[in-house]
Amino acid sequence: MNPQKMFLYGAIVLAGLAGPFIFPNNQVQMTELWLFIVFALTWDLVGGQMGYNSFGNVVFFGIGMYACAVVQIGLVYDVGEYTAAKGGGTAFIFDLAQYIWGFAIGLPVAAMLAALAACVLGSLVLGMRGHYFAICTLGLGIAAGEIAAGWDWIGAGSGMTPAPPPHDIDNVNRLFYYMAFALAVATFATIAWLLRTRFGLAINAIRDDEDKAEAMGMFTTRIKVTAWVIAATFLGAAGGIYGNLKRFIDPLDTAFSGATIGVWMVLMAILGGKGTLWGPVIGAIVFQVTKELFWTYLLGWQRVALGVLIVVIVVFFPEGIVGRVRQMFPERFGPRADAREGAE
Amino acid sequence: MFRVMKFAAAAVIATGAMAGTQAFAADDVITLGAAVSLSGKYSTNGEHTQRGYDLAVQVINERGGVQVGDTTYMLEIKYYDDESTATRGAELAERLIQQDGVNFLLGPYSSGLTKAIAPVTEQHGVPMVEGNGASRSLFTSGYRYLFAVLSTSEQYLASAIDLAAERAADLGKAPNELTVALAFENDPFSQDVRAGVVEDAQRHGMQIVIDDKLPKELNDMATTLTRVRALQPDLLVVSGHARGAATAIRQIQEMRVDVPMLAMTHCDSAKIIKEFGDAAEYTLCASQWAPTLTYQDDLFGSAADYAALFEKTYDYAPPYQAAESSAAVMTFVDAFQRAGTLDRAAVRDALAATDMQTFYGNIRFDETGKNIAKPMVLYQVQNGAYVVVAPSEWAAADPVLPRPGWADR
């Protein structure tokens, strides 16, 4: 790693750590931003690097969200009673140790359940290609939402309130911020590393010509499922944090929100430049900042403005921000021969 | 790489600027914050809510504002659009409090949104007075900063069930022989109304023959209605916000479904009389308020005066969602004046001690923050008008039971 890169990474980590102290009022939006980066990176691993456009990644996000909330509650109380009482209230109090343990166990369970779901669903649907795969995943997202909305144990359509934070934590949002930050760093590091290995070459090969890759002796379906499982693991953990951050889980609006988060994760990756490492990160930052600005200054027209932005991006910058920059300054940002140094 | 850094820096600066430019706090203005549904599935009622707030603020400011201690303040509302989603609502509440420095929140539209926002206001110790979150579960969570001027969800259709039991003879049956069909949207509010209806029906020994959960964004309930036609229940109860009411009226007419009693929520916010004319006749409607009630206050005058002013301003009769929103603003103003300060905790305590009459009804909160001084009313659509038929204290006419069949109209 060259010094320039070290400096950049160092600066980003420092900015991330200091963020909530510099802009305490924007803490929640920054927490959301780190989670958005996770959404975009994990979507891009499958959608950009492997060429499988999934509209159903929100399934893993929702599974993680419910799994984490259920574990947090289930460790202390009966989940059915908790949801029947419509969440929390004075009868359901969590002390600090219970709350922390809830996360310590809940987040790994969320990640694992999401990974398991990806493994099962992936084996079933990753044999499909192109539009068929895209439509199938779209269906998965909708089906998951309907199932959650009909399941009384997790609150059905009335939604679920995650474990209320104990009063000893005076700034619980800061806890969420650092969890989201750590998750985003871990996701980035894992994907950056993966893309330097043979696995990275393999998923790129699948994107470029799957038949040829298969003819070369690759177990393509196994590789594809593995990639989806990796994406789902991080997305599941992100869901666990997001549910607690929002403090109310609506099955269709929060957990399996295909029309918002499900679409946004695709959009952020495309906006930044799909199939690049930094594209999804930059896409997420630009998206979150413009979204917040539109929502503030264009009240009533925010969705229209966002729609116009999407059209402009797709028409004028189909290769995304990073892709565009690479085309304009190939000597500085273009792909390099040594980019795959670890691949051999 | 350098460019990437420059870009990141610009993004950070932009975020900072966003926080800076928004903070405003003029000396003699009290800013109330509200995230309401200006778009999305609740946009009809979101608009009623916003207009209710705006009308109250306008009238209060015209009367010279609010006297708090020695200072007179004007009122102002900072709005955001929550797009009818819980996630967005919670974000916006956070933003109103943290970035815009708003100390007092007015509620959003719907129980789901209120549920999402209440934990945020509670955490920051920001008082919220709401007029559109009726779900009973909001008031079992121990929230100290949440106050609701409306009657809670389980009371919505209780009088319709009681009416069915009282008038069972008109339907040719004993109360415990009556059969009930339920069609409720799968959202926090409607499901809570359902819980209340189920309790009431069981108390009278009625039999529930259909119990359907309808999807959000309700556009079609033909499957349920087909079963209603087959099983012929005595009472059909529907709840699904404004869309649910409109869909039910439209399809019951299209499919010519005959049912002796039809009761629902949100008739007036769906403007069923204006939109569907004769098809809306004989529908029983739960309402938080009616312009014919005899309440009054110094600001708006009587309930009828409020209705006239609202109609003059916005060109349609006020649905109760607008009335209760106006009442929420009045509740805040009353608390500001009694507290004599704009300290959040003091205003919260003043709110808890509220005991007043408004054009909308009496307002007095129990320790959980819900209004216990105002009952629900039940309308029936008769000759193109909403007529109060229950409770008997305000009843202007006898309910027409059973509904005439489509063949006889």
Image (tube, coloured by chain):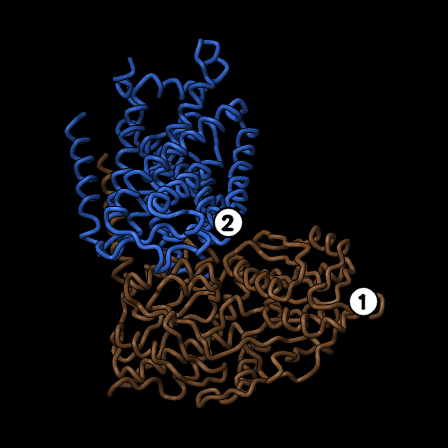
Chain colours: A blue, B brown
Q: What residue type is labelled 2?
A: Ala
A152 or A180: nearer the eye?
A152
**Label of residue B405 in the image:** 1
Subunit under mark 1: B
Q: Position of residue B316 (x, y in %)?
A: 59, 76
The C terminus of chain B lies in quadrant:
bottom right
B325 or A284: nearer the eye?
B325
Q: Where is residue B303 in the image (x, y as percent from the top left)?
A: 54, 85
Q: Toward which corner of the image does residue A302 lie, by quadrant?
A: bottom left
Q: What residue is rendered at 51% in x and 74% in y?
A: B322
Most distant residue in the right direction: B407
Q: What element carries label 2?
A: helix
- Relative horizontal placement of residue B297, taking residue B285 as reference (left or right): left
Q: Position of residue B385 (x, y in %)?
A: 68, 78
Subunit under mark 2: A
Count of residue discs: 2
Q: Do the residues indicated by labels 2 and 1 lie within the same chain of the protein?
A: no
The N terminus of chain B lies in quadrant:
top left
Q: Determine the CA span between mark 2 and mark 1.
A: 36 Å
Q: Which amino acid does label 1 sit on?
A: Gly
Q: Position of residue A274 (x, y in %)?
A: 40, 32
B126 or A201: nearer the eye?
B126
Q: Toward which corner of the image does residue A13 lie, by quadrant?
A: top left
Vertical side of B66 occupied by A305: above or below: above
Q: What residue is rendered at 40% in x and 63% in y?
A: B140
Vertical side of A144 occupied by B358: above or below: below
- Residue linked to disc 2: A156
Q: Toward which corner of the image does residue A111 lie, by quadrant?
A: top left
Q: What residue is rendered at 57% in x and 63% in y?
A: B199
Any part of residue A255 in sight = yes
**Label of residue A146 in the image:** none
- Relative horizontal placement of residue A309, taking residue A169 as reference (left or right): right
